[in-house]
Image (spheres, rainbow, N blue to C red):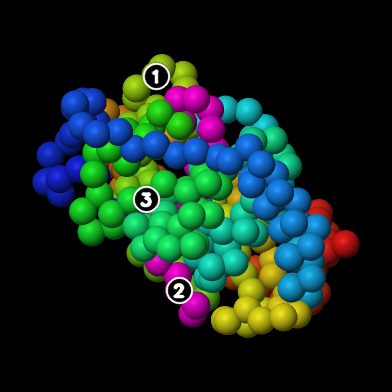
Amino acid sequence: MMEFYSSSDTCQHPPANPQVAHTTSRVSPWLSPLAYLLGRHCLLPLFFGQIRITGQKNIPTTGPVILAPTHRARWDALLVPYATACLRKQDLRFMVTIDECQGLQGWFVQRLGGFPVNSKHPSIRTLRHGVELLQQHKTLVIFPEGNIFRDGQVHQLKPGIARLALSAESSYSGLGVKIIPIGINYSQPYPSWGTDVSIDIGSPIRVTDYMSGCIKQDAKSITSDLAKALQQLSHQETKVTNHAFAEITNS
């Protein structure tokens, strides 16, 4: 996800709602529960060795939330709902690249809450739909690194996630948007059968704490703190074999 506003150094306000075509997302009433059921009880437990999760208490049960995971493999999109959906008790909405909405994969993605963003030329339509979802107290998943990185390091975050959160918060007083950093760590760079995985959920970043009136500076501060949180969570992999995660274990 790329910048939604220009890169000038002046303070900016969120853009007004222009008359543009509308981006939408939807969740199939039959495919979604089936996918969650098969993923949680069949696919993921059979494929992975151990799935260990910490920090579930950091997931708010109500209110608008952006889940911001590190991106280490395509499995991430299945593991995030595995770790969080039962707490929020609602379907997740995913902001994904246009490429992920093509072909058979795209058919499933777009019926499981995914909606596309052009990472090279992001449009105001995508921003507006993300804001609308947060105004409706939905759970939005955005991978802030943009791409998959398998070196275990947190790469430069895209500023769009912070700017979307600020735009939503400023659109409705007291909305209470929270960004939840999530570190996903695999025991090997390319997950295969029997790979262990740890999912570490960090403390919420409260968007209202960053609203000074200068959206460019506020976005920089949120992005910086989110990066620091993800860096801390991304180093949990060294504890996979000697730390009692066990808030959820593969059973």
Residue 140 in the figure: left or right of residue 96: right
Q: Which residues are magenta?
A: 134-151
> Where does residue 5 sit, x and y in percent of width and height?
20, 43
In this view, the residue in front, 7 or 86, is 86
Residue placed under numbered mark 1 in the picture = 172
Residue 250 in the figure: left or right of residue 57: right
**Is residue 110 in view?**
yes
Magenta run includes residue 204: no
| Label 1 element class | loop
Residue 172: name its quadrant. top left
Mark 3–mark 2 Cα distance, whole angstroms, equals 20 Å
The amino acid type found where label 2 is placed reads Phe
> Where does residue 165 sit, x and y in percent of width and height?
39, 37
Residue placed under numbered mark 2 in the picture = 149
**Is residue 83 in view?**
no
Callout 3 touching callout 2 (CB < 8 Å): no
The quadrant in which the N terminus is found is bottom left
Q: Residues within 10 Å of mark 2 (few under 14, many from 20)?
A: some
Residue 132 in the figure: left or right of residue 17: right
Residue placed under numbered mark 3 in the picture = 116
> Where does residue 105 sit, x and y in percent of width and height?
49, 62
